[in-house]
Image (tube, grey):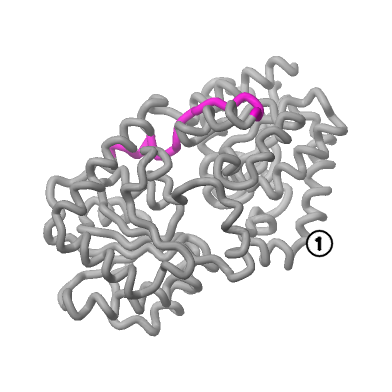
Amino acid sequence: MTRIFLIAGEASGDALGAALMRALRDAAPEISFVGVGGAAMTAEGLTSLFPLEDIAVMGLLPVLGRLPSLMARITQTTRAIIDAAPDCLVLIDAPDFTHRVARRVRRQHPHLPIINYVSPTVWAWRPGRARAMRSYIDCVLALLPFEPAAYERLDGPPCVYVGHPLIEQLDALTPAASRENGPLLVLPGSRRAEIVRMTPLYGKTLSLLKADFPDLEVVIPVAPNMAEPLADALQDWPLSPRLVEQSEKYAAFLQARAALVTSGAATLELALAGAPMIVAYRVSPLESLLRFLVNVDSIVLPNLIAGENFIPEFLQEEATPTALAGAVATLLHSDAARDRQISGFAQVRAQIAGAGDRPSARAAEIVLDHALRKA
């Protein structure tokens, strides 16, 4: 029986892991799974070594604050992999944790295939990681179409574009014919730190917009488990937005006239839904000192995929209420500004769709190929 060890380090990785498990089971019904995951992977039959929340830590300062417990989990996970003797190890995102495990496993078990599902951002940050990965990663399964070329350029391990999971949602993200009377979407982020940092900024932005758009409806999709911190952050807002659950999120995306969004995966969802947007991002002052090491002209995923900065972005000190309000007002007033973005969205959609309609099945095929080679 083929045995796969999977490690997911956060909620998005848990969803990817669950889809991969289903695709692997479809291809090899007798397959078994061990590893680390969350609720989605548990529903697919995984018994996690420990709660995913133990390692779902983002940002320099939070990681440093929990370093002793994270190191203990790295040791525990490494031992579990060696004891389980799987046919393949699959790392899903969370490279600060999973790659430390992989390096230890490779030293002790040099012939175990190790697959990295979701590339670290080597094309933007610390490009030397790509070459270093060759010593402990056998293949990278990329979600973004430009990543294989980046790995070849950076002398990294083999990298295959299997497709972004949103490919399987393209029908649900078909843009609406008209958004003329649609709301303004505001997406502060999907993590607590982002909500705490970005929501006050967006509240001040909306205070400025109220003068020109007194009847503007504001809609906020609520990320899972973020209702409480979001409610606290919204107390000082000048208006009461309409909150929608995840089940209503895509409907809101398709209706929106414009969006104000924190940089992240939501920008790609909005692009596929055809919703013009303004992107903002702020990090802590300490993390901001590291931004000069970033090697890309944009941090917005649709801009990177299209190879053109057609979506405005405002980072750190540039992300002020005045600047954001002005940019949002331009989108709300100007058909030309919206049309320019909609043209760029068509390029993004075409490139994303190029991998086929089932990324998880393509990923499963590659994982099984490596597992069977080992066996």
Name the residue at 63% across, 41% down. Answer: 127
Name the residue at 13% across, 45% down. Answer: 177
Question: Of residues 295 and 131, which is closer to you in this image?
Answer: 295
* Disc 1 crowd, CA 10 A, few/some/many (<14, 14-19, 20+): few
* The magenta stretch spans residue 162: yes
* The magenta stretch spans residue 375: no
Q: Image height check: is 26 above or below 142?
A: above
Residue on which the image places disc 1:
68
> How many callouts does the rendering have?
1
Residue 91 found in image quarter: top right
The quarter of the picture where the N terminus appears is top right
Mark 1: secondary structure: helix
Tag 1: residue type? Pro
Counting from the top left corner in percent of width and height, residue 50 is at 71, 52
Name the residue at 65% across, 28% down. Answer: 155
Question: Of residues 20 and 340, which is closer to you in this image?
Answer: 340
Counting from the top left corner in percent of width and height, residue 184 is at 25, 64
Name the residue at 26% across, 69% down. Answer: 326
For residue 268, side relative to residue 141 (left or right): left
Q: Residue lying at the far front in this picture: please name it.
A: 292
Write down the region rendered in magenta: 155-171
The quarter of the picture where the C terminus appears is top right
